[in-house]
Image (tube, rainbow, N blue to C red):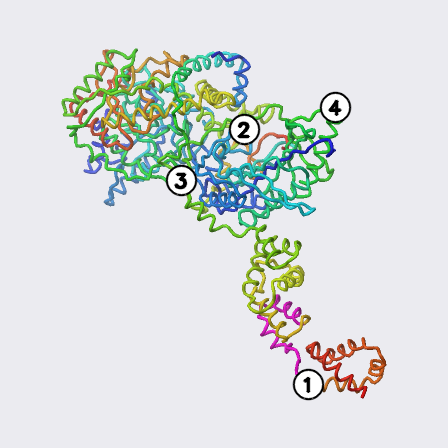
Amino acid sequence: MEPTISTLIELRDALRRGELTSVAATQAMLDRIVAIDNTIRSYLTVTDEMALEMAATADRRRAEGEDTPLLGVPVAVKDLLCLAGAPTTAGSKILENFISPYNAHAVDRLIEAGAVILGKTNTDEFAMGSSTESSAFFTTRNPWDTERVPGGSSGGSAAAVAAGLAYGALGTDTGGSVRQPASFCGLVGMRPTYGRISRWGVIAYASSLDQVGPMGQTAADTAALLSVIAGYDPRDSTSLDTPVPDYEAALTGDIRGLRVGVPHEFFIEGIDTEVEAAVRAAIEQIARLGAEIIEISIPHTRYGLPIYYLIASAEAGANLARYDGTRFGERVTGSDVIDTVERTRALFGPEVKRRIMLGSYALSAGYYDQYYGRALKARELIRENFRQAFETVDVIAAPTCPTTAFKIGERVDDPLTMYLNDMLTLPLNLSTGCGLSTPCGFDSKGLPIGLQLIGGPLQEATILNVAHAYEQTQPRRKPELALGDIA
Amino acid sequence: MSLTHTDVEKIAALSRLSLTKDELTHFGEQLSAILDYVAMLSELDLSDAALEDQTAEHHNVTRDDIVLPSLSREDALFNAAETRDGQFFIQSILEE
Amino acid sequence: MLQKYEPVIGLEIHAELMTQSKMFCGCRVVDSVEAEPNTAVCPVCLGMPGMLPVVNRRAVDFALLVALALNCEVQSNNIFARKNYFYPDLAKGYQISQYEFPIGLRGYLDITLSDGTIKRIGIRRVHMEEDTGKLTHLSDGSLVDFNRSGVALLEIVSDPDIRSGEEARAYAMRIRQILRYLRVNTGDMEKGVLRIEPNISIRPRGAEAFGTRVELKNLNSFRALADGTDFELDRQAALLDSGGRVIQETRGWHDARRETFSQRSKEEAEDYRYFTDPDLPPLYIDEAWIESARIALPELPQAKEARYRDEFGLSDYEASVLAEDRAVAEWFDAAVAGKGAGASPKTLANWILNDLFRLMNERGRSIDTLPVTPAALVALLGQVEQGTINQTTAREVLAEMMDSGRDPSSIIESRGLAQISDEAALTSIIDTIIAGNPGPVANYLGGKENLLGWFVGQVMRETKGRANPAVVNELLRTRLERERM
């Protein structure tokens, strides 16, 4: 039951050497999903038939001498990315029965690279949340402690990879939704530079902030996924038309002379002392690898949260206006057209309603300047902070989250406390760089802690290499799944 | 910043959300708290912040005027709650 | 009412742009009246989850042409914004439009009123946006067709400079003519590709403050625009006179009843919550882009009219009819340019306005499908000038040219239509006629000199109209005088 191969790279190499078939690897994953995902609850939809077909195709192609970057590798996709012919729900009741007629660009890239899509993973509704607790369907469990959240919104993807239910996964990161669950689940998870990965077919939450991100057990796994999904797409006007480097080849492990900035504002009041200690220890380790550590300042860090919530909510309000029950999605029939639209939209969960309303208010006549307009201008300050920082350093190192995974139910109805969890990830989204979270030890409860590495625009290879170099110095641990009779 | 009941009703209407009385109260309190929190942005001096200054690195992204295939009507209507005669069907709406 | 109140009217004109594909997706732009519903739609224009817009560059080129033609200051910084409102025909729950940063600002258009005076109407702004879908209302519900959803749309907003239905009509007709000249819109109001909505209010003469305005819709002809506007002005004046007040609302024009009716009251202004669309990076229109549009800009109707009047000596009427349609005007221009030593512009204009138009009408031909080229008309008139054929024959030849597309000289030759100017041949015919008609000859000699025309007619009959009338005249006069001796 326990797969002997645990990383994506290991599996890919084994497939290449012909040590096993994709069908066998895929079937093992599907069996494991059947066995333990009723506890973890990472998948919303398991596309088993499609997966086995893809695996068989991959094996056939390999038998014919073909090879592609992810040929035969089973992966999972957050249910915010459209997969043609399969349900795509965005974790929402309103899209419960929506069948997408198209693939997201990133999904197309995975399929072209030969990957096998195992299914669609759980997400906070429309990616609005940090725990999967606002998924309309169920809450995903953290494989390290099933009483705790896996983080969010890409919590399903993180839990699936951490629990060995996929060799890698895609999430989306609007305010930290890849990095935070990666941190909570002990994975590498990246938010690439805005525009690096097409948003085509990715259900929009906040368009100026949304970005697809890969998650893997290691930096190399993450790099392999990124190499596949990155690249220009003319269907997304914000897509960057710049060459994609070979991210795996960039993992030299040599970080000598690299300038690593540590912003004191990221070690905020209220940060868990064990988290702080682990992150500082990791930074020391990076110094021992030959990097130069420099104290820096991102002075407007504390304004990131209010800026983020105003901008993201305003954009979300417009992005979610299309769910009116006319062309797709559920419809709740009311007394007239307007009543029907309003009742249909009442299917949104509380977190979504809250943000739509905040967004409507922030843009409304008489309040635009005070809220949305001000947030837009303040966003420029954060951007400027990062621009200046990257004049003196190559990489910024900081905690990913102020705490480790919290208990399910603990913060559900306290939006502000919940939001504070994203305090350290979202400044990057407001800026123009890239960032990742990589495991850097455990707290005394045995929960993973994440180190956040932030790079400037299109510096994905640099931060992946730092993560890789650091990773080589650390023991690897997998969750001892507290799964009762299954484990 | 404390939103009144009327404020919240107006925001809900603008957002086309039908909310229960309890929800109105509850969201009103939460939104008020969030607005209090985001008010910290007023501490910032933003007088120099330049927006729309034609410096966006990424600009003038356009496509050629080329026709691409559309969906089949069947696919276009596939996800609709109700259709009739090849069209999306909704309740009566006042002629505009 | 005009003594007491001042009408204040501004026009909002929506014009669909004649691009091949839609504004933000590759769906074909189809005739929304003819096409089967929902056959020119895709995930983008249906507003499906995760779909993204990409700007159609030709739509921007078209918008730029219009902005230049309407004398606007072209804005280098173009930002697309989301205009948020719910309506079942609006796929995304917002319309992509331009708000603070439109493509054109502060333009103007001169219109000619019926008394010949010229009035300048300010153009407040020209901006790009996307069209919505279309609703059809049934007894038990409504149908939504998204074929039109996402079609590139231009909104042209005038200043409130218009004072009457007649001015509104003159302004709108000019706009339509320019859009057609630029080949960016067919001008078909019945099909809704051009939609005109006046905002109408009145205020007591001398007052500063504007009155409450009413937006008028459903105007699908220029007559409806003029009549609807005048009706509304009278209605508002009567309301104020009777101590009532005008309420802010949208009113429709009932074409059959010739009156406006209330459609929707706008007690509160709609809150559109505009903000920059994060899916669309800014569009910077630089000098080079503007210059390339300027080069593509054709001579506009007003400039043509002025040239026809001032350089060619045409009447206002002739000039405006020739300039009305760009294809006709360009046909005329080509003829004038190729005329050489032949017909004058005035003669060409007469032939086009009288004969060519009549033949086109009779044969149901448009200028675009005309088998007669400008050069062929010039060649035909050259034959008249040279005396090879007369005017009457030329008309016949032109008709034949319309039917066969053959050039005039080959028609003249093959049908033997060339005029007989040969004096010897004509003299013998004349001799025969005089010998055979002693009565009329005697009467002529007795003083009825207007009988000369009768003799000319006889010669023409004998020659099947081919005799050169000038030569015949001269020969007849001389021959008849000789009879006196």
Determine whether, in the image, residue C281 is placed left or right of residue A260. right
Task: Tell me: residue A268, above or below residue A160.
Answer: above
Name the chain under label 2: C
Query: How far is mark 4 from mark 1, CA to CA?
Result: 88 Å
Depth check, mark 1 against mark 3: the one in front is 1
Dot 1 crowding, Cα within 10 Å, few <14, some 14–19, many 20+: few
Q: Amino acid at mark 1?
A: Ala
Element under disc 4: loop
Mark number, residue C243: 4
From the image, which quarter does the C terminus of chain C lie in? Answer: bottom right
- Number of numbered tags placed on the structure image: 4
**In this orientation, does residue A150 appear?**
no
Mark number, residue A399: none
Query: How far is mark 2 from mark 3, CA to CA?
Result: 29 Å
Q: What residue is at 32 percent from the left and 29 percent from the top?
A: A432
Depth check, mark 2 against mark 3: the one in front is 3
Determine whether, in the image, residue A73 is placed left or right of residue C57. left
Say which quarter of the image contains residue A233. Answer: top left
- Of the two numbered discs 4 and 1 on the same chain, state the one appearing first in sequence: 4
Q: Amino acid at mark 2?
A: Phe
Depth check, mark 2 against mark 4: the one in front is 4
Q: Amino acid at mark 3?
A: Asn
Q: Give the percent coordinates (x, y) of residue C225.
A: 67, 40
* Residue for badge 2: C86
Residue range of the region highlighted in magenta in the rendering: C393-422
Q: Residue furthest bottom?
A: C485
Pick the residue in front: C20 or A308: A308
